[in-house]
Image (cartoon, rainbow, N blue to C red):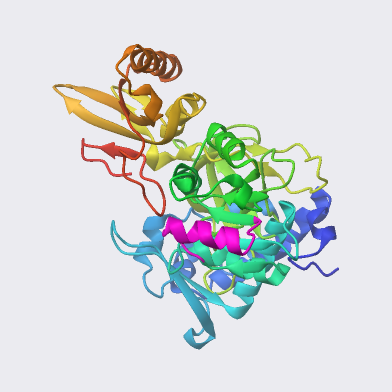
């Protein structure tokens, strides 16, 4: 039975047993490919795996050690390359700002598989031939921009590779070419709206239907805010460069979790402390094995992303399991006076308040022996009047609701629109002056 990675309704609707059989075939092939890399040849040999014949069931994947970002850095530049260099047609790399970059190599077949997965993802959100796709993600070594570009072209959409920034030009392109679909970070979507009136535009100037948002964790409240402001549908997505990039998982039009394409990725969730598997329905760290890439095979990659696998079927008919929106990365978790806090928890509180603007920043610093949490957020200019009671009331409400959720009593600073800096790429939401970087 042939299973293509795009426009193949059968693959997206395979029953679980057939899907597992396909995964096992591809896992064996991936292990065989991995054994041709210097890194995995040594690592797998140490566990007694010398060929694909040592993998009998999907459960045998647990014999394989986890792969981490540090492993990828250690393997730089060619330790994970499984083909001759002249078979490689593209590479992507992390910025390397915190150390040696991680590098992923792609053959033409790898890129074709990735493109096909992006076609599938786009179609799941209702995109189709004739849509106009304005890509506001950064292009370059970062996979966010280029990842969906080729899928949108293959689907037959008119692609505008606008990249990030230059907000005035983004609006002009949206108006002149009747953009129907935007791909951007959620923080940039909110920034767009905040600049719309100032730059002389209104919603009636545009033909927008949907936004595909990703590259940074965000709450359901932020998605709802984007939908309400632009009067469109906003779809959550998930990807990481180690697993190609965009289109590891995508929401469908039901918007009830992101379908993770299990014919291309083997999914595990583990307890981030014990590293033992957790059951579907239990929050854990996402671990992924890519099953359809030969240039750089990666087995059991610890993403550090926290999510929950949703085992129940989706009403759209696709049988791949879904994951909940990413709560955050284990690296993002703040420990404040002994309490674990995720920035997304604070975002959930403030973004459901209509007075709050589109930008916020969480600052943490040491005051004596205690940690001090301060929430900086922009609010509507109309609140800055001679009567300070409205500001005081909003501050008190934020403090009370945040404390009720995370048990930490924060300080709150309210600012006029435009006070906080805007990032054109991934939003910086935390400044930890205790020496930690996010």
Residue 49 visible in the displayed image: no
Comparing 281 with 333, the one in front is 333
Residue 147, image x and y in percent?
Answer: 56, 65
Position of 94 relative to 79 (above/below): above
Residue 359, image x and y in percent?
Answer: 40, 37
193 relative position to 360: left or right: right
Q: Is residue 168 magenta?
A: yes
Q: Residue at x 68, y 57 (%)?
A: 121
Going by the picture, which residue comes out furthest to the bottom? 86
Q: Is residue 127 magenta?
A: no
Position of 200 relative to 391 (above/below): below
Comparing 201 with 89, the one in front is 201
Q: Residue at x 57, y 38 (%)?
A: 229
Q: Magenta stretch?
A: 162-180
Residue 423 visible in the displayed image: yes
Q: Residue at x 38, y 39 (%)?
A: 332
Placement of the C terminus among the 4 image quadrants = top left
Placement of the N terminus among the 4 image quadrants = bottom right
Residue 108, image x and y in percent?
Answer: 60, 79
Comparing 199 with 256, the one in front is 199
Comparing 411 with 244, the one in front is 411
Residue 239, image x and y in percent?
Answer: 55, 54
Q: Quadrant of residue 293?
A: bottom right
Position of 167 relative to 80 (above/below): above
């Amino acid at each position: 039975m042939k299973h293509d990675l795009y426009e193949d309704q059968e693959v997206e609707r395979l029953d679980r047993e057939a899907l597992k059989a396909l995964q096992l075939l591809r896992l064996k092939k991936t292990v065989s490919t991995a054994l041709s890399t210097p890194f995995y040849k040594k690592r797998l040999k140490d566990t007694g795996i010398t060929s694909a014949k040592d993998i009998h069931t999907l459960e045998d994947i647990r014999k394989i050690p986890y792969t981490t970002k540090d492993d990828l850095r250690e393997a730089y530049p060619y330790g994970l390359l499984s083909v001759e260099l002249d078979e490689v047609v593209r590479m992507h790399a992390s910025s390397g700002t915190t150390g040696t970059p991680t590098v992923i190599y792609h053959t033409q077949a790898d890129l074709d598989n990735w493109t096909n997965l992006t076609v599938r993802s786009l179609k799941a959100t209702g995109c189709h031939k004739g849509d106009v796709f304005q890509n506001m993600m950064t292009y370059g070594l970062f996979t966010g921009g280029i990842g969906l570009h080729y899928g949108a072209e293959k689907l037959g959409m008119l692609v505008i590779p606008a990249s990030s920034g230059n907000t005035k030009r983004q609006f002009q392109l949206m108006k002149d070419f009747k953009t129907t679909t935007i791909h951007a970070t959620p923080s940039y979507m909110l920034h767009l709206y905040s600049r719309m009136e100032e730059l002389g535009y209104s919603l009636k100037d545009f033909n927008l239907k949907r936004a595909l948002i990703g590259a940074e964790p965000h709450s359901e409240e932020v998605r709802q805010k984007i939908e309400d402001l632009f009067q469109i549908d906003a779809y959550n997505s998930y990807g990481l460069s180690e697993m190609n990039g965009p289109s590891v998982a995508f929401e469908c039009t039901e918007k009830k979790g992101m379908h993770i394409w299990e014919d291309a990725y083997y999914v595990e969730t583990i307890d981030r402390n014990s590293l033992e598997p957790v059951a579907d329905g239990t929050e854990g760290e996402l671990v992924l094995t890519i099953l359809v890439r030969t240039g750089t095979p990666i087995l059991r990659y610890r993403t550090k992303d926290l999510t929950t696998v949703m085992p129940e079927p989706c009403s759209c008919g696709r049988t791949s399991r879904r994951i909940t929106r990413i709560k955050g990365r284990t690296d993002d978790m703040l420990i404040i006076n002994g309490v674990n806090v995720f920035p997304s928890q604070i975002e959930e509180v403030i973004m459901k308040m209509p007075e709050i603007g589109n930008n916020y920043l969480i600052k943490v610093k040491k005051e004596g022996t205690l940690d001090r949490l301060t929430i900086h957020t922009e609010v509507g200019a109309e609140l800055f009047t001679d009567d300070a009671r409205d500001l005081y009331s909003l501050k008190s409400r934020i403090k009370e609701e945040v404390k009720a959720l995370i048990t930490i009593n924060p300080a709150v600073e309210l600012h006029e629109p435009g006070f906080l800096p805007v990032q054109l790429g991934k939003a910086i939401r935390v400044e930890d002056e205790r020496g930690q970087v996010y």
